[in-house]
Structure formats: C-alpha cells, structure tokens
C-alpha cells in the first residue's frame, strides 16, 4: 500500500500534471504544424522550385533510377530520403519560431507586470492621531 500511495502522491503533483497537459497539447500542436508544412508550405515551395516535391526527393543507393520513392521502396532499394529531412527541418523551424513568439510574449507580460507601480503606501496619520496613539501606549505601560 505504501508504494501505491507514493505513486499517487507523485502522479498528482502539480508539475507532473502540468507536464502531461503540455505533452498532450504539444502533440496536437505537432499535428497542426505537420499539416501546415505538408499541405500548405511544401506545395508553395514545390511551385517555387519548379514542381519539386521534397517529400518524395530521394537518392537510390543501388544506382538505378525509379519513377517514385514508393517504386524504389517496393523494389527493395536502399534510399537516402533527403526530402524527408528538409520537411522535418521546416517543421522544426516553424515550431521553434512559434515557441520563441510565445516565450517572448510571456517575457513581455512579466516585464509589464514588474514595471507596474507598486501599491502606494498608506498616507501617514495626522499628528493628532500619532499623539493619541503615543498617549494610549503610555497608559498601557502604566497598568
């Protein structure tokens, strides 16, 4: 029972739960980025480079020429799929830039929060109140 209780305590700590939420959101964000890169950016890059589809860019290591990457794989040829590396690199740059923008926004918010004026100190009581407080304190000491 002790081990189960320890695990429950560990799993329910705020940091572990926060990390789990971050991983799940990160996975969903990764799917969105993959779609943006594959379905939006890479076709534009392909048009700009004369119709090159980077995802299918490869070099067959057996020296033969194949019509497509799928045909090379079907023939059992070893291939260097450099197009997949280009695709993954673009995805990485997009994710890194998005994280940079989020962290930059958070840092700006923290700076604004730190720069906000501290609450003003309460005004000093009038001289009469100070004098009355001193008299009260002296009377308490006499008792």
Image: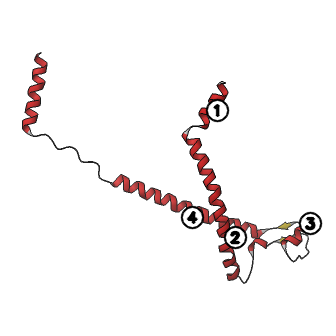
Disc 3 to disc 4, how far (Cα)? 38 Å
Instruction: Using a 10 Å C-alpha cutoff, classify the residue at mark 3 as few (fewer than 14 neighbours), some (14 to 19) or many (20 or more).
Output: few
Q: In the displayed structure, does residue 31 sit left or right of residue 104?
A: right
Q: Which mark is residue 7?
A: 1
Q: Which residue is mark 3?
A: 76
- Between the residue at mark 1 and the residue at mark 3, the CA separation in whole angstroms equals 48 Å
Specify the quadrant of the image occupied by residue 13. top right
The residue positioned 75% from the left and 76% from the top of the image is 53
The spot of residue 95 in percent (x, y) is 61, 62
Which label belongs to residue 38?
A: 2
Query: Could you tell me which quadrant the C terminus lies in?
Result: top left
Mark 2 crowdedness (10 Å alpha carbons): few <14, some 14-19, many ≥20: some
Q: Secondary structure at mark 4?
A: helix
Does residue 128 sit above or below 36 in this rendering? Answer: above
Residue that badge 4 annotates: 97
Does residue 60 appear to the left or right of 82 in the view shown?
A: right
Badge nearest the viewer, 2 or 4? 2
* Residue at 62% in and 33% down: 8
* Labels 2 and 1: the sequence-earlier one: 1
Marks 2,4: beta carbons within 8 A: no
Number of the front mark, 1 or 3? 1
Relative to residue 135, is residue 101 drawn left or right?
A: right
User: Mark 1 to mark 4: distance in Å?
Assistant: 37 Å
Q: Position of residue 15 (x, y in %)?
A: 56, 42
Name the front one of labels 1 and 4. 1
């Amino acid at each position: 029972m002790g081990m189960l209780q320890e695990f429950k305590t560990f799993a329910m700590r705020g940091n572990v739960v926060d990390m789990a939420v971050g991983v799940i959101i990160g996975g969903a964000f990764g799917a969105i980025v993959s779609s943006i890169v594959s379905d939006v950016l890479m076709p534009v890059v392909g048009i700009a480079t004369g119709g090159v589809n980077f995802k299918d860019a490869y070099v067959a290591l057996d020296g033969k020429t194949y019509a497509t990457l799928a045909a090379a794989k079907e023939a059992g040829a070893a291939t260097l799929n450099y197009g997949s590396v280009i695709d993954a690199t673009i995805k990485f740059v997009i994710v890194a830039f998005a994280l940079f923008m989020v962290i930059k926004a958070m840092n700006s918010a923290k700076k604004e929060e730190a720069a906000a004026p501290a609450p003003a100190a309460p005004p000093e009581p009038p001289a009469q109140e100070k004098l009355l407080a001193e008299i009260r304190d002296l009377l308490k000491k006499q008792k």
